[in-house]
Image (cartoon, rainbow, N blue to C red):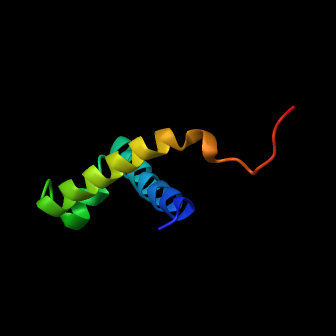
């Protein structure tokens, strides 16, 4: 997988995590736990993947540009 594909995959997982945290904050509803079980092995793996993707996107923060330099 090229870097761009990895960037978009990581971004997708982080968006899923952000929506999940928004639901927890607003409605006290954990979508991941609802779909995969409360701290089941599968939901824990999803939480770990989302965390790793968040850390990866920290390193990719400066690469998300349209290719134009600002003056």
> Residue 46 appears at what percent x and percent y?
27, 58
Which corner quadrant of the image does residue 33 belong to?
A: bottom left
Q: Nearer the viewer, residue 70 or 20?
A: 70
Which corner quadrant of the image does residue 35 belong to?
A: bottom left
> Residue 22 appears at what percent x and percent y?
41, 46
Residue displayed at 15% across by 56% down: 38
Q: Is residue 23 visible?
A: no
| Residue 46 vertical placement versus 67 (above, below) | below
Residue displayed at 43% across by 45% down: 56
> Residue 50 appears at what percent x and percent y?
34, 51
Q: Is residue 37 left or right of residue 30?
A: left
Q: Nearer the viewer, residue 8 or 4?
A: 4
Residue displayed at 37% across by 52% down: 20
Extreme residue in the right direction? 71
Q: Is residue 55 visible?
A: yes
Q: Nearer the viewer, residue 11 or 26?
A: 11
Extreme residue in the left direction? 40
Residue displayed at 48% across by 39% down: 58
Q: Is residue 58 left or right of residue 32?
A: right
**Quadrant housing the C terminus:** top right
């Amino acid at each position: 997988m090229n870097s761009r594909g990895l960037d978009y995959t990581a971004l997708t997982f982080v968006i899923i995590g952000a929506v999940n945290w928004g639901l927890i904050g607003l409605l006290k509803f954990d979508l991941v736990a609802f779909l995969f079980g409360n701290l089941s092995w599968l939901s824990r793996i999803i939480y770990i993947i989302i965390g790793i993707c968040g850390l990866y996107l920290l390193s990719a923060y400066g690469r998300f540009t349209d290719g134009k330099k600002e003056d």
